[in-house]
Image: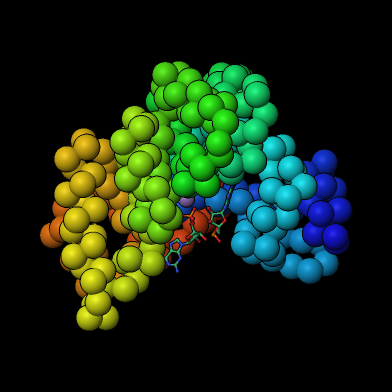
Amino acid sequence: RIIEEDLRAALATGEGIEVAYQPQISQSGVVVGVEALARWHHPTRGYIQPSQFIPVAEQTRLIVPLGEWILRQACTASRRWPDLFVSVNLSPVQFRSSDFADRLIAIVRECGGHPHRIELEVTEGVLLEEDGRTTDALRRLREAGFRIALDDFGTGYSSLGYLHRFEVDKIKIDRSFTQSLGQGGKAANLIKAIVALGHAMSVTVTAEGVETETQRSFLDTAGCNEMQGFLFSKAVPEEQLMRMLSRAS
Ligand code: G
Ligand code: G
Ligand code: MN
Ligand code: NA
């Protein structure tokens, strides 16, 4: 439980935890948004992957203060790039507090941010929660102006059920599909079908995990509205993002 104790300490001081931002690119090649991703530089063990500490944060509910801290950072930072939206990942665990929606709304207000510029990324895990609390919270957040994106779309069991039951603004095609392109399998047809589905539902379609020009070109022709991936940029610190944006304009 070293990770748990150290994460608790890091959250108390704010030391070592940072937010990195990965650009999201429109079809015309412009950065339209960024995804906020947690980064942790441990004082003695060095960089710890989110895939290691996010699950621990979820098990211990430290994801609640961590998630709120990230939202606060992302909102504050976003005031410096008024033309972009900022996406924040939400864990199913965060939805378990009854005042979750109110807290998010209050945080954005305190930071002087605007819900219309914040996109909340949820995975199927969020909507698998049985009680109606989660779905009520999502509806309230959307009514407050937040945009909702379905993350890792296509990998779970109930992706279509979501689209049926909830108003969402965006689907993010899981990077496993992008990365299977050109390997002679079904990924190309699946992606085309997801894009058609998204457009039929009037939602924006983003492809994740774009690493090569060949993938980009296929996804562009398939009609993906936005792309994200190492071909464009990995997640970078705020200052580096600012430099990238000023170079591009
Ligand atoms: O770069 P990447 O390794 O950042 O992230 C790995 C996983 O951790 C992804 O599934 C991502 O959604 C998740 N993750 C990263 N940052 C956050 C965060 O702030 N909150 C939540 N809930 N998940 C995050
Ligand atoms: O699950 P979620 O979509 O939130 O995950 C974002 C994760 O995807 C982060 O770990 C991020 O670093 C990673 N990621 C972003 N772009 C790429 C990419 O082009 N290739 C790979 N392999 N991972 C990526
Ligand atoms: Mn995400
Ligand atoms: Na994803």
Name the residue nearer the viewer: 5 or 228: 5
- Most extreme residue toward the bottom is 184
Residue 8 in percent (x, y) is at 82, 47
Q: Is residue 215 left or right of residue 36?
A: left
Query: Which residue is drawn at the image coordinates 45% and 24% (left, top)?
Result: 139
Query: Which residue is drawn at the image coordinates 18% and 65% (left, top)?
Result: 189
Q: Is residue 139 left or right of residue 168?
A: right
- Visual colour scheme: rainbow
Q: Would residue 26 be visible to someone looking at this image?
A: no
- Count how many numbered circles sit on residues in the image: 0
Name the residue nearer the viewer: 210 or 143: 143
Q: Is residue 40 left or right of residue 126?
A: right
Image vertical order of residue 94 relative to residue 107, above or below: below
- Looking at the rendered image, the quarter that the N terminus falls into is bottom right
Query: Which residue is drawn at the image coordinates 45% and 32% (left, top)?
Result: 118
Q: Would residue 71 be visible to someone looking at this image?
A: yes
Image vertical order of residue 60 relative to residue 182, above or below: above
Image vertical order of residue 145 relative to residue 131, above or below: above
Name the residue nearer the viewer: 176 or 237: 176
Query: Which residue is drawn at the image coordinates 31% and 73% (left, top)?
Result: 180
Residue 207 in percent (x, y) is at 31, 56
Name the residue nearer the viewer: 28 or 59: 59
The picture quadrant where one finds residue 99 is: top right
Residue 54 in percent (x, y) is at 66, 54
Residue 182 in percent (x, y) is at 23, 77
- Most extreme residue toward the left is 221
